Every structure is written in C-alpha cells, then in structure tokens.
Image (cartoon, helix red, strand yellow):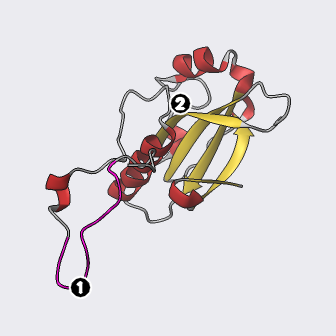
C-alpha cells in the first residue's frame, strides 16, 4: 500500500510493476510511476501520470494505453514503470475525477496533458470576513508559505 494525495489521504494498492500487471475489473483512480535512479533511496518513485476509469481492465494496461509511449519515454524503459490504484466501490465518475484532479494538482505528473492548479482566487470565494473571524491571512500559492 502507498498513500497519495493531500495529506496522504488516499490508500492506493501497489506499487506493482506495470509490465507484469493485470488490471482488475474495478472502478478506480490510478497513478503510473517511474522508479527513480536514487542510490540513497532505492524505492523512490515519481508520479508521471494520473487517470481514472470505471473499469481498469478496459484501459489498455500495461502498454496499449494511449499515453503509454510517453510513460516509457519518461521512465527510460518499460521496466521502470509501476502502477498503483485506489479502488472506489460505488464511486461515481465525478468522485473519481475529483480525486484524480487533486492528485494532478499535487504531483504535477509530466505525462498528463491536463494540468490543475492548487491556488485559489478571490473571486472564487469572495472576501472572507464576518463578525466572528478576521480576514484570511494565507497566501494564494500553497507551495510558497512565505506569502
């Protein structure tokens, strides 16, 4: 098991070597990872693609997926690729999309064509103050805590 997401909130099955993996017939969010070339941390992975499916067995795993060529190019070879998945029994398409968009914002996977930002803008929530609280003092960029 590996935990991914904001505050590592989602328990994903895996990682498993993608080359020998048979995808289960489940609705899930999945992440394709490559094994980093780190002598000091031999089990360190980089998330390079995040997706979701109503049935993982129909996604074209291991190497018939539309983005598999990009995965192999990024990893150097197909044997550096691993996969993990978060089975969401009864989860709706919207629920799976929400989780996958969050993971794309957090990890910024290089092989995803879609990009998502974690930042917020004033017009999304308006000014935040009322009789019981002061205005928000946090910055708009979650990666820069000095704002």
Frontmost residue, 132 versus 67: 132
Compared with residue 54, is residue 90 higher up or lower down, i.e. above or below?
below
Q: Which residues are magenta?
A: 129-140
Q: Which x, y percent locates residue 138?
A: 35, 59
Q: Residue at x 18, y 54 (%)?
A: 122
- Name the element at disc 2: loop
Compared with residue 134, is residue 43 higher up or lower down, i.e. above or below?
above
Q: Which residue is mark 2?
A: 60
Image marks 1 and 2: residues in contact by CB distance under 8 Å: no
Frontmost residue, 144 versus 45: 144
Q: Earlier in the sequence, mark 1 or mark 2?
A: 2
- Direction from residue 109 to residue 36 in the image, left or right: right
Q: Which x, y percent locates residue 107?
A: 51, 40
The mark found on residue 132 in the picture is: 1
Q: Which x, y percent locates residue 87?
A: 56, 57
Q: How many residues crowd around disc 2 within 10 Å: few (fewer than 14), some, or many (20 or more)?
A: some
Residue 53 seen from this side: no
């Amino acid at each position: 098991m590996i935990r991914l997401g904001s505050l590592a909130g989602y328990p994903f099955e895996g990682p498993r070597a993608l080359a020998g993996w048979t995808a289960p017939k489940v609705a899930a969010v999945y992440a394709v990872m490559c094994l980093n070339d780190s002598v000091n941390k031999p089990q360190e992975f980089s998330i390079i693609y995040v997706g979701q499916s109503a049935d993982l067995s129909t996604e074209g795993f291991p190497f018939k997926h539309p983005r598999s060529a990009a995965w192999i190019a990024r990893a150097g070879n197909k044997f550096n690729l691993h996969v993990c998945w978060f089975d969401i029994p009864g989860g709706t398409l919207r629920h799976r999309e929400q989780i996958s968009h969050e993971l794309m914002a957090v990890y910024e996977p290089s092989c995803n064509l879609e990009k998502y930002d974690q930042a917020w803008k004033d017009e999304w929530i308006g000014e935040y103050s009322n009789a019981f609280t002061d205005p928000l003092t946090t910055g708009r960029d979650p990666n820069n805590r000095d704002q």
